[in-house]
Amino acid sequence: MVRDMIPWRRKRGGGKLLRQERSEENPVMELHREMNRLFEEFFGDLETGLAWPGSTGLRSKAGTGTVRVDVSENDKEIRVTADVPGMEEKDIDVELSDNLLTIRGEKVQERDEKKDDYHLVERSYGSFERSIPLPGGLEEEKAKANFKNGVLSITVPKSAEAKANRKQIPISAG
């Protein structure tokens, strides 16, 4: 059967690739398995978006490189709070255009250590981008951003007409 010729299969309900054991070892198939393992280790589980523990894998805009945000709204304003630990305000760019709030950041770390018997240079890069659609009726020119202790808070006030257009809808039982 064709399925017996495939060197890998998926767990039931799990999605992770499993290697089928074979009595003979084919070098091409071994390379195929090793490449699958390397991709899973580097990118994590692409179906669930979860990285392996200890993985430093890269992510798309929707993966681990994504900043976590809370969006709240009251009668006066919309507030977006983003957790960006380990970053400084100079590493972050906030843009609001046509009711689309975009938060971008990039962090570059460099470590240079020289001792008598070795010289160590390490560089790491990480970036994220998150775009959040906001409702109309905002005063974009009055938007403010504040950064403190790794938390970015963005406040966008509502316009007077947006405040006036709010309508409470009564709920009836039955």
Image (cartoon, helix red, strand yellow):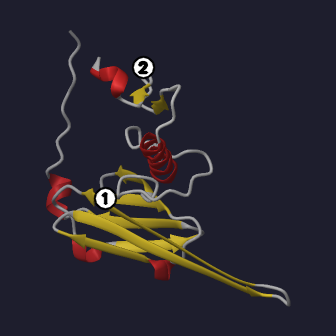
- Say which of 22 and 109 sits in front: 22
The residue lying at 56 percent from left, 67 percent from top is 150
Amino acid tagged 2:
Arg
**Disc ID at residue 76:** 1
Is 119 displayed left or right of 105 in the figure? right
Instruction: Rate crowding at label 2 as few (under 14), some (14 to 19) or many (20 or more) other CA atoms within 10 Å.
Output: few
Residue 62 point in image, percent of width and height: 36, 53
Amino acid tagged 1:
Lys
Instruction: Rate crowding at label 1 as few (under 14), some (14 to 19) or many (20 or more) other CA atoms within 10 Å.
Output: some
Q: Earlier in the sequence, mark 1 or mark 2?
A: 2
**Disc ID at residue 35:** none
Front position among marks 1 and 2:
2
Mark 1: which secondary structure? loop
Residue 132 point in image, percent of width and height: 28, 57
**Disc ID at residue 12:** 2
- Asked if the residues shown at circle 1 and circle 2 are in contact, with their CB atoms under 8 angstroms apart, the answer is no
- Say which of 141 and 117 sits in front: 117
Residue 170 point in image, percent of width and height: 20, 27
Residue 128 point in image, percent of width and height: 41, 65
Q: Find residue 8 and report its image quarter.
A: top left
